[in-house]
Image (cartoon, rainbow, N blue to C red):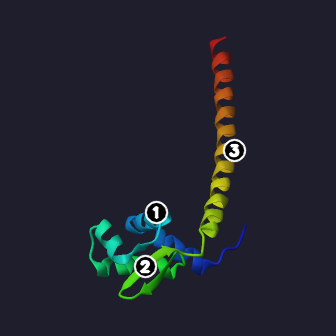
Amino acid sequence: MVQYATAHLDASFAALADGTRRGVLEQLGRGESSITDLAEQFHMTLTGMRKHVGVLEDAGLVTTEKVGRVRHCRIGTRRLDEVTAWIDNYHQLWEERFSELDKVIEALKQKEQRDGRKQQD
């Protein structure tokens, strides 16, 4: 199994676990925004939005830059490749297991049909 950098992966999943933070990432995917604008858009206090942005920044998903009195946010340099690889790995594992389960179910159905015909004869 592929080994992942646990701390980065945990930070990414923790950041993505919150709907507001996913919304912030979606918004920043469209373009740079200030923390004030994000707070207004998500109907929250500046302090609350700063905390959300801080979690995203700690995970490397967002970067901020203070220009004068305004802190601007943009998508970070760290991409979600590691998260995607982890999810893809488990997706493949479950697909294989479900495929095997489908084979077992099909074999049981065929056996049931054969047994049913024998009892009718």
* Total labels drawn: 3
**Residue type pointed to by label 2:** His
Residue under label 1, please give it. 26
- The residue lying at 39 percent from left, 64 percent from top is 19
**Residue type pointed to by label 1:** Glu
Q: Can residue 14 be seen in this view?
A: yes
Crowdedness near tag 1: few (<14), some (14–19) or many (≥20) residues, C-alpha within 10 Å: few
Q: Marks 3 and 2: which is nearer the front?
A: 2
Q: Position of residue 81 (x, y in %)?
A: 64, 67
Q: Position of residue 58 (x, y in %)?
A: 50, 82
User: Does dot 3 land on a helix, a strand or a loop?
Assistant: helix
Task: Reply above or below: 28 against 59.
Answer: above
Of residues 91 and 52, the one drawn nearer to the viewer in this rendering? 52
Q: Position of residue 57 (x, y in %)?
A: 49, 80
- The residue lying at 27 percent from left, 72 percent from top is 44
Residue under label 2, please give it. 72
- The residue lying at 68 percent from left, 28 percent from top is 111
Of residues 93 and 78, the one drawn nearer to the viewer in this rendering? 78
Residue under label 3, please give it. 100
| Quarter of the rendering occupied by the N terminus | bottom right
Which image quadrant is residue 4 in?
Answer: bottom right
Between disc 1 and disc 2, whose residue precedes? 1
User: Does dot 1 land on a helix, a strand or a loop?
Assistant: helix
- The residues tagged by marks 1 and 2 sit, at their Cα atoms, a distance apart of 15 Å
The residue lying furthest to the bottom in this view is 68
Q: Can residue 42 be seen in this view?
A: no
The residue lying furthest to the right in this view is 1
Which image quadrant is residue 80 in?
Answer: bottom right
Say left or right for 56 vs 68. Answer: right
Decide: marks 3, 2 in contact (CB < 8 A)? no
Between disc 1 and disc 3, whose residue precedes? 1
